[in-house]
Image: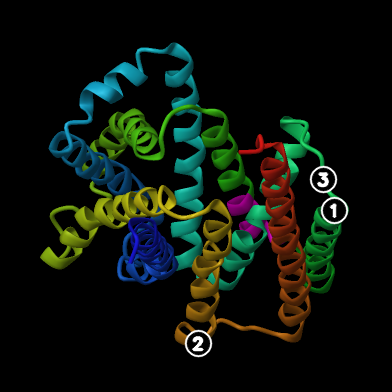
Amino acid sequence: MSDNNRDRIIGTWYAVASFLLWGFLPVYWKALEEVPAIEILPHRILWSFVFLALFNGIKKRWPLIKETYSSANNRISSLVSALIIGTNWFIFIWAVNADHLVEISMGYYINPLLSVLLGVIILRERLTVWQLTAFALAVLGVAYMTLQYGRVPWIALSLAGTFGLYGLLRKTSRVGALTGLTAETAFLSPLSIGFLVYLIGAGNTVLGKASVSLHLLLVGAGIVTAVPLVWFARGARRIPLSSVGFLQYLAPTCHLLLGVFLYREPFTQVHVVSFGLIWAALFIFSLSQVRIKKRMEGISKTALPNP
């Protein structure tokens, strides 16, 4: 087996493992459902920073991080992305423990399409006819559910929107994913510590009152947050971006299956129609991405000089 094939296989396994861990993360938050989401969040931030600080220390990456954040633009960008990802994490944790996994899955299914729309609005990117068709189908799916249930699926749209904005900031920043998350959790950690101190002072916390296992789960929130990102970073370096694009649907598929089959959330005919439109949109969108990739490869080949 060639080194390239071996690298691609290893990369695929890392990427699959990261998306599966993200997909099954709701099971972890369900184990903490007796703790309010507003208290889980600062633990997730603080212990993520502790884990990443140790990881970066072992890998001797702190000089790189220090150099990266000598730039004021990088510091401001990471502060904004920290606030956005913190909001995303809170909505996700709350929604899991409020039994909205089906709607969470919708949010992460439509996220790639919303990311394309953000690219059009902010980066002035152009949509192909097929991408426009895919986006229209997704809008129909969301609109159908809104009309049938009489409410906007705000959880799905909030998760897709915050994660889409976060992805846009990551795309326009030169800061790597691990370096970025380290800085983001570093920015939010003082706020997290301050809020936990406030809860302790008010006597409105599980700290010191809950079981040892619950305390360990709160500490482990940092590990289950950071580990899939480490795996994803290792996988994304080894496999084509198109492969990453297909694999990303593993996570919302796990969310949907967990919601329907493990936690018995309703999946009605309205859901079937709405999700059917969204899945059709994703199928068309994925095909359009493959066609764009092939076209770009063809241009690259024709642009090469003759040997």
Secondary-structure class at tag 2: helix
Q: Is residue 246 visible?
A: yes
The image's mark for residue 127 is 3
Q: Residue at x 54, y 60 (%)?
A: 243
Amino acid type, mark 1:
Leu
Q: Residue furthest front?
A: 307
| Alpha carbons under labels 3 and 1: distance apart | 6 Å
Give the mark nearer the N terminus: 2 vs 3.
3
Q: Amino acid at mark 2?
A: Phe
Residues at circles 3 and 1 in contact by the CB criterion of under 8 Å: yes
Q: CA distance from mark 2 to mark 3?
A: 37 Å
Q: What residue type is disc 3 on?
A: Leu
x, y percentage for residue 252? 54, 68
Between 22 and 123, the residue placed more toward the observer is 123
Quadrant in which residue 50 is drawn: top left
Q: At x 51% / y 28%, what residue is drawn?
A: 173
- For the residues labelled 1 and 2, say whether their Cβ atoms are less than 8 Å apart: no
Nearest to N terminus: mark 3 or mark 1:
3
Tell me if mark 2 has few (under 14), some (14-19) or many (20+) residues whose alpha carbon lies within 10 angstroms of its own.
Answer: few
- Residues at marks 1 and 2, CA–CA distance in whole angstroms: 33 Å
Residue 2's spot in the image, x, y percent? 35, 61
**Image: magenta residue range:** 153-160
Can residue 206 be seen by looking at this rendering?
no
Q: Which residue is under mark 2? A: 261
